[in-house]
Image: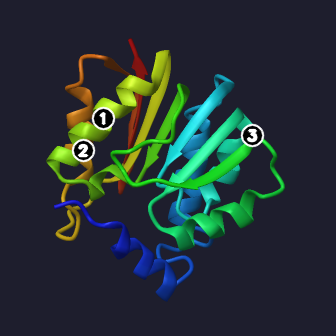
């Protein structure tokens, strides 16, 4: 079973930054690598899935002409909006995967979000991503790779599921001590 939006909303109500995105050295280094993996290109339209409180959103904004960031937890969405409200080209909205904000995208970023989905929801989300990515568009997936019993998927399993998608080609991959970063291109 996928983790429901209420699970995340409760986390953000109990702690405005439950994973220490704004203060963690691990998160800071991971975000730096995430942005570096995208800096070879400018993205006219980008979508960030599971934006949380918007720390990565703010960093991605410099690479995009239009950036839409979404999260399932309204409290997180409000925090993300506050973090980027001075950026006219960034919009933050509530969305529950596998539903995606409308549009066609040159970039979709899924950082530490897809492993919260069960097999069916993951497949439907990947179908949705494939359908909204323009040809030549990119999917950047970044996930924790240490074992966990609290998520429906393991990070490596998510990336393996993406690699099995015939419409997506792995063009860049990195494995770090605790996470994996893979960039795919839509055929």
Q: Nearer the viewer, residue 176 or 46?
A: 46
> How far separated are the C-alphas under marks 2 and 3?
29 Å
Marks 2 and 1 sit apart, C-alpha to C-alpha, by 6 Å
Placement of the C terminus among the 4 image quadrants? top left
The one of 152 and 95 positioned closer to us in this rendering? 95
- Inspect this view and state whether residue 20 appears: yes
- Under circle 3, the secondary element is helix
* Residue 48, x across and y down, in percent: 53, 45
For disc 3, the marked residue is 62
Instruction: From the image, tell me which residue sits under label 1.
Output: 126
Residue 108 in the image: state x and y as whole percent: 49, 35
Pick the quarter of the image with the N terminus: bottom left
Task: Name the front one of labels 2 and 3.
Answer: 2
Say which residue appears at 48% left-offset and 88% top-offset. 14
The reply to whether callout 2 and callout 1 are in contact (CB within 8 Å) is yes
Residue at the image position 58 percent from the left and 64 percent from the top: 77
Q: What residue sits right under mark 2 in the picture?
A: 122
């Amino acid at each position: 079973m996928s983790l429901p939006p209420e699970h995340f909303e409760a986390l953000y109500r109990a702690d405005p930054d439950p994973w220490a995105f704004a203060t963690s050295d691990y998160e800071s280094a991971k975000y730096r690598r995430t942005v570096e993996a995208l800096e070879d290109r400018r993205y006219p339209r980008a979508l960030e899935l599971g934006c949380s409180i918007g720390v990565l959103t703010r960093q991605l904004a410099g690479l995009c002409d239009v950036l839409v960031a979404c999260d399932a937890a309204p409290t997180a969405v409000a925090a993300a909006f506050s973090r980027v409200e001075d950026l006219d080209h960034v919009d933050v909205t509530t969305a529950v995967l596998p539903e995606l904000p409308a549009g066609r995208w040159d970039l979709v970023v899924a950082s530490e979000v897809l492993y919260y989905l069960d097999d069916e929801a993951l497949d439907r989300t990947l179908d949705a991503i494939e359908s909204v990515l323009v040809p030549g568009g990119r999917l950047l997936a970044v996930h924790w790779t240490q074992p966990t019993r609290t998520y429906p998927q393991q990070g490596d399993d998510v990336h393996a599921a993406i690699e099995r998608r015939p419409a997506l080609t792995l063009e860049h991959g990195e494995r770090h001590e605790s996470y994996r970063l893979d960039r795919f291109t839509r055929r």
